């Protein structure tokens, strides 16, 4: 008889099964691939990869770039397979039996799963009715649970709202455990909203970023953490040797060198977010939540039926069904202007016909 780890059968799985969508708007991916000049540079660099060698210098190169950009020491940076792996390893490093990890809810669905894999005690803190974070309530949960790690996501996924820097600093000032700020969507909100400047002031602060969203590298799986060197050194122990492949590293290196080439696309998505939000506000019965990201959260009494209707049309969005605090909600990733016009037209048609 096979003896699996206790609790594994009860652990939810992150569903990544897909179909050939006409419009794929369910994973918060960039609507377009790399800018032509960036792609040309990437392909040229990949043609010179020594496939017989393990990654080494490539990791050092990209770390040096990020450190220089944020005026940090290279020992304060570490890369992983997307910010998801970074977060998972931080949960492992600070978790364990008898340890508590505090996180907001609703937020990134993997927090709950990573808590279980870290064999820790999860302490979800419910967001307010408008999905804002009550900083006092969050701090109180950290203190009462004697947490070893606290996590906040800004802008928050799937709600799209931003947590102010003043609130982040307040939390940092009032907790004595590691504090992770998940900034997967930060580029859409703007660097002024980032907690990175607070790293110099609060050595227990950690910032996680990804290349999957604003830089459109979801296929390459590249993310990184910025923290005090002692945190990076300890967290690195949880990673496998050579955990990030050379192909992803050199691609990310070129993309980061040419990150200014992505700014027009980021600005376009910001503009689209505002346009889509304003358009949808005119749809009867539809609640549209403000977003600082590349997606929008909608609430509608017949959201399940609407999702089925869109699915039949080959339009994939994220439906939360009856998930706590996300009942009757749909999250729609922003596409190109033309794609957004298509799905909004279908949503409008459904509402007019079904009421």
Image (cartoon, helix red, strand yellow):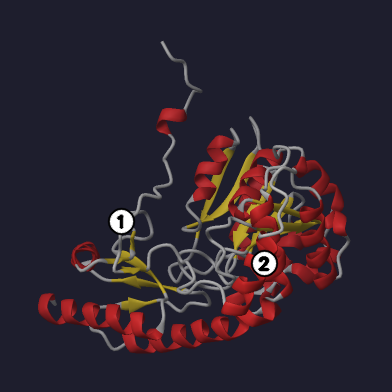
Q: What element carries label 2?
A: helix
Residue found at the very far left of the displayed protein? 353
Where is residue 272 shown, x and y percent of the image? 45, 85
Q: Which residue is drawn at 46% across and 64% down?
A: 158
Q: Distance between the residues labelled 2 and 1?
A: 32 Å
Q: Residue at x 64, y 56 (%)?
A: 248
Residue found at the very far top of the displayed protein? 1
For disc 2, the marked residue is 44
Q: Residue at x 74, y 59 (%)?
A: 174
Q: In which quarter of the image is the C terminus?
A: bottom left
- Left or right for 243, reference 220: right
Residue 221 can be seen in this image: yes
Frontmost residue, 335 versus 98: 335
Where is residue 220 shown, x and y percent of the image? 58, 57
Mark 1 packing: few (<14 Cα in 10 Å), some, or many (20+)? few
| Residue 203: image tag | none
Residue 163 can be seen in this image: no
Where is residue 69 shown, x and y percent of the image? 81, 72
- Left or right for 333, reference 138: left
Give the quadrant of residue 64. Answer: bottom right
Reply above or below: 279 against 10.
below
- Of tags 2 and 1, the one toward the viewer is 2
Q: Quadrant of the N terminus?
A: top left
Please tell me how many numbered marks the rendered image carries: 2
Mark before the other along the chain sequence, 2 or 1: 1
Where is residue 182 shown, x and y percent of the image? 63, 60
Mark 2 packing: few (<14 Cα in 10 Å), some, or many (20+)? few
Q: What element carries label 1?
A: loop
Give the quadrant of residue 94. Answer: top right
- Left or right for 166, reference 274: right
For disc 1, the marked residue is 19
């Amino acid at each position: 008889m096979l003896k699996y780890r206790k609790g594994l059968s009860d652990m939810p799985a992150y569903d990544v099964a897909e179909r050939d969508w006409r419009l794929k708007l369910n994973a918060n991916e960039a609507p377009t691939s790399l800018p032509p000049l960036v792609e040309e540079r990437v392909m040229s660099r990949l043609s010179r990869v020594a496939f017989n060698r393990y990654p080494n210098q490539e990791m050092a190169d990209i770390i040096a770039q990020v450190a220089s950009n944020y005026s940090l020491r290279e020992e304060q940076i570490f890369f992983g397979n997307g910010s998801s792996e970074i977060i998972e390893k931080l949960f492992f490093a600070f978790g364990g039996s008898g340890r508590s990890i505090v996180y907001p809810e609703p937020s990134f669905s993997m927090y709950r799963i990573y808590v279980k894999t870290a064999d820790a005690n999860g302490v979800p803190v419910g967001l307010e009715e408008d999905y804002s974070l009550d900083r006092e309530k969050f701090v109180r949960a950290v203190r009462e649970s004697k947490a070893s790690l606290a996590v906040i996501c800004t802008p928050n996924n799937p709600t799209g709202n931003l947590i102010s820097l003043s609130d982040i600093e307040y939390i940092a000032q009032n907790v004595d455990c590691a504090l992770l700020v998940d900034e997967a969507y930060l580029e859409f909100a703007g660097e002024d909203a980032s907690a990175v400047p607070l790293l110099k002031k609060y050595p227990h602060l950690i910032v996680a970023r990804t290349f999957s969203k604003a830089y459109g590298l979801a296929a390459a799986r590249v993310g990184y953490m910025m923290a005090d060197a002692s945190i990076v050194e300890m967290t690195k122990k949880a990673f496998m040797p050579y955990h990030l492949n050379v192909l992803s590293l050199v691609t990310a290196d070129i993309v980061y060198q040419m990150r200014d080439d992505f700014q027009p696309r980021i600005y376009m998505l910001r503009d689209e977010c505002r346009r889509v939000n304003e358009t949808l506000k005119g749809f009867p019965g539809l609640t549209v939540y403000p977003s600082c990201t590349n997606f929008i959260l909608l609430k509608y009494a017949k959201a399940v039926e609407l999702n089925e209707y869109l699915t039949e049309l080959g339009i994939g969005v994220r439906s939360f069904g009856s998930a706590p605090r996300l009942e009757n909600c749909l999250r729609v990733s922003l596409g190109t202007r033309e794609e957004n016009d298509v799905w909004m037209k279908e949503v409008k048609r459904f509402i007019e016909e079904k009421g």
